[in-house]
């Protein structure tokens, strides 16, 4: 009952799975949530197989659920509390993206992104707050450079990440005297499934990535950097040189940032900009 507990959403693949593996290696009890039961079991199997005998399947509980549904988030939190009686770290990792010019995009697409990326973070954090305050724990939001710089053809994604970051910054400021730690982690372009599962203008999955995934930062590197930032109680984590430059240039030279960002997106394969 005295072991540390971490809860991770979007844990069936990519960064979520890598965060779970890194947590298990650090000795955490790990609660996982995602919509895919098979994906969650694959994550647990990956954790055990990479643990060199030091990680056991009873270190994990999994909850099949959708973070856009408040009741699912509450059930996820309650499952962990019932099993372990505490929460030390909550990592809000679940997220979806989109790609499409706003003029051509259905409003429902933006609503789906807000429901998952923003409201999912709010729902899970709200349910976990009593336990996080008791442990003086950490709330983590896996955000994006798109939460600092609005990206063309990603209006819904940027809006949801801006909203997430505003919520987490406010939460941090409210809790300056409670001991709660709040981290906003922005990985930059990372090898993951998020672009393949991104929605198009009509709300269908793209099923392909416009980027060369094997050339991007690995999910494992993101996970290690994120856990280091949690351990060090950092406020922000901005990864990759491209990501750091994007944030800096947008702050100092916003017009130049717009032009550079537009040019990058325009050069993507099958870009919505002709």
Image (tube, rainbow, N blue to C red):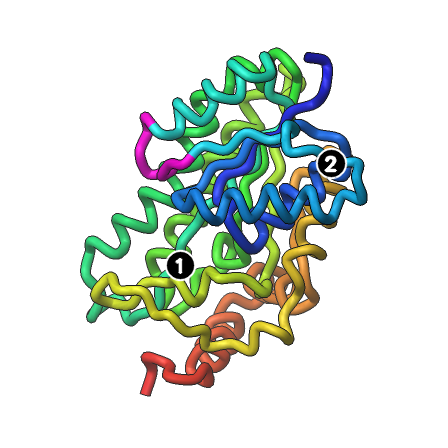
Q: Residue at x 57, y 72 (%)?
A: 213
Q: Which quadrant of the structure image shows residue 48?
A: top right
Answer above or below: position of 150 versus 85.
below
Q: Residue at x 49, y 53 (%)?
A: 147
Q: Residue furthest bottom?
A: 274
**Residue 138 visible somewhere in the drawing:** no
**On the rendered structure, is 106 left or right of 110?**
left
Front tag of 1 and 2: 2
Residue 61 position, x and y percent, is: 54, 29
Query: Helix, strand, or loop for circle 1?
Result: loop
Picture disc at residue 97: 1
Q: Main secondary structure of the magenta part?
A: loop
Q: Specify few, some or many for label 2: CA neighbours under 10 Å numbering under 14, 14-19, or 20 or more.
A: many
Residue 266 position, x and y percent, is: 42, 82
Asked whether 22 falls inside the magenta stretch, the response is no
Q: Which residues are magenta?
A: 64-71
**Residue 246 visible somewhere in the drawing:** yes
**On the rendered structure, is 4 left or right of 134?**
right
């Amino acid at each position: 009952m005295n072991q540390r507990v971490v809860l991770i959403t979007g844990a069936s693949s990519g960064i979520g799975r890598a965060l779970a593996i890194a947590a298990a290696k650090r000795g955490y009890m790990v609660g996982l949530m995602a919509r895919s039961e098979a994906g969650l079991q694959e994550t647990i199997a990956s954790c055990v197989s990479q643990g060199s005998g030091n990680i056991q399947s009873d270190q994990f509980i999994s909850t099949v659920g959708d973070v856009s549904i408040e009741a699912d988030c509450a059930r996820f939190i309650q499952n962990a509390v019932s099993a372990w009686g505490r929460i030390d770290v909550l990592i809000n990792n679940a997220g979806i993206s989109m790609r499409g010019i706003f003029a051509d995009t259905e409003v429902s697409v933006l609503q789906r992104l807000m429901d998952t990326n923003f409201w999912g973070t709010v729902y899970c954090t709200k349910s976990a707050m009593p336990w996080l305050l008791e442990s003086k724990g950490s709330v983590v939001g896996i955000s994006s450079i798109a939460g600092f710089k609005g990206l063309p053809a990603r209006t819904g994604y940027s809006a949801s990440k801006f909203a997430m970051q505003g919520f987490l910054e406010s939460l941090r400021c409210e809790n300056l005297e409670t001991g709660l730690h709040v981290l906003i982690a922005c990985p930059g372009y990372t090898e993951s499934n998020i672009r393949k599962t991104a929605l198009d203008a009509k709300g269908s999955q793209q099923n392909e990535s416009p980027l060369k995934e094997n050339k991007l930062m690995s999910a494992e590197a993101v996970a290690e950097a994120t856990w280091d930032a949690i351990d060090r109680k950092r406020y922000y984590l901005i990864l990759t040189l491209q990501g750091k430059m994007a944030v800096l240039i947008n702050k100092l030279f916003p017009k130049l940032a717009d032009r550079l960002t537009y040019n990058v997106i325009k050069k993507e394969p099958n870009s919505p900009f002709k």
